Image (cartoon, rainbow, N blue to C red):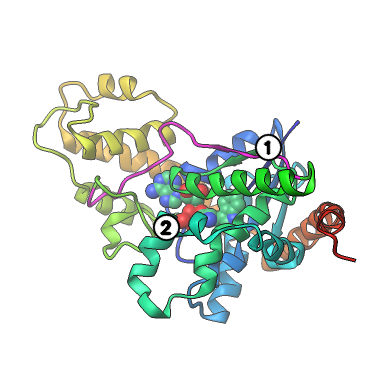
Amino acid sequence: MQKLFSGVQPSGNLHIGNYLGAVKQWVALQEQSESILCVEDLHAITVPQDPEVLRKKTLEIAKIYLASGIDPAKSTLFVQSHVSAHSELAWILNTIARMGDLDKMTQYKDKSQKEGETTSIGLYDYPVLMAADILLYDTEVVPVGDDQLQHIELARTLARRFNERFGETFVVPEGRIQKEGARIMGLDDPTKKMSKSAPSEYNYISLTDDEETVLRKVKKAVTDSGTDITYSDDRPGLKNLINIYSLFGDKTPDEIVTMYEGQGYGAFKTGLASVISGFLTPFQERLAAISDDEVKAILEAGAVKARAQAEAKMKQVRERVGLL
Ligand code: AMP
Ligand code: TRP
């Protein structure tokens, strides 16, 4: 079975882009993979977090994994900070990572622009911690949205560099993106990806939005000039909506275009909102039914399993590096 690792940070509200780009893939892949799924709390604190909110969000993300169909009997589910090997390996990888590797990271460039001189060292070092997450578990595949591919490339570079210097230790992982879900675009601006930090709530549909909110946001979504439903690159707004429809409705874009032939945007948007809510409503019911205690027990059991694997790898790493 292939070894899979992925994670999401517990910051902001997860939106349908996160679900379609990342979590949905994990659910499908857990059948054929040895999956390790992490709530990346140490990554979240690279930008200021309210401690109380962070604690709440950490549990909420884990509940979202479960409500999406992640099965703790098949996947190991844990919180990053519960396995201290992540921080320890990140430190060691820091000593082989180069400023030149990190200076070109576009996510850092974007985020640090906003924060200027107050940007934390942690934010700069974020991709090294991410490499540690991945490399600790002999990960072969890392399913993510396409914005994370550059970080995975760094994990590959560091694995190779470490192996060359200290002997074969790490598996070189592969990033994996899903064709249509790889980049869900903003509903109010189809030239930029859907983002939880977007200034307008009309940019995204949150996983906790109710039916009325979904309909309101879909109705307001930017479409392009023209009145018929077609799927093409010249109509990026409509193309994005058809992609979302396709992923939630399990239909190909062509099937959707055929379904709405001769009908206008109104019918298409009502149909789209109902397909999204058709997923979200039962998802939210499952989410509400999971208690804090239940999820804490699952995370604790997951940490025990993850710790054992991570510790075995760290033993090897310390030895290779020459730590007594
Ligand atoms: P983030 O929101 O940056 O914490 O991302 C969590 C996961 O969701 C990562 O795997 C991202 O690549 C993925 N993701 C975030 N935004 C989108 C989007 N608009 N479309 C597809 N995947 C996304
Ligand atoms: N940086 C990822 C994101 O923003 C989250 C993440 C942290 C991650 N560590 C990871 C994803 C390891 C995959 C593998 O989405």
Quadrant, the C terminus: bottom right
The quadrant in which the N terminus is found is top right
Asked if residue 316 is positioned above or below residue 241 in the image, the reply reads below
Disc 2 element: helix
Which label belongs to residue 140?
1
* Kind of residue indicated by mark 1: Glu
Q: Nearer the viewer, residue 24 or 145?
A: 145
User: Residue 316 shows which numbered tag?
Assistant: none
Mark 2 CB near ligand 2 (8 Å cut): yes
Decide: few, some or many residues near mark 1? Use Cα within 10 Å; few <14, some 14-19, many ≥20.
Answer: many
Give the vertical position of 92 relative to 76 (above or below).
below
- Secondary element under disc 1, as helix, strand or loop, is loop
Q: Residue furthest front?
A: 165
User: Picture quarter containing residue 200?
Assistant: bottom left
Query: For the image shown, how many numbered marks are present on the structure?
Result: 2
Position of 310 compared to 109: left or right?
Answer: right
Residue 167's quadrant in the figure? top right
Q: Main secondary structure of the magenta part?
A: loop
Q: Residue at x 61, y 68 (%)?
A: 42
Q: Does the stretch in magenta take in 186?
A: yes
Residue bounds of the magenta highlight: 170-189
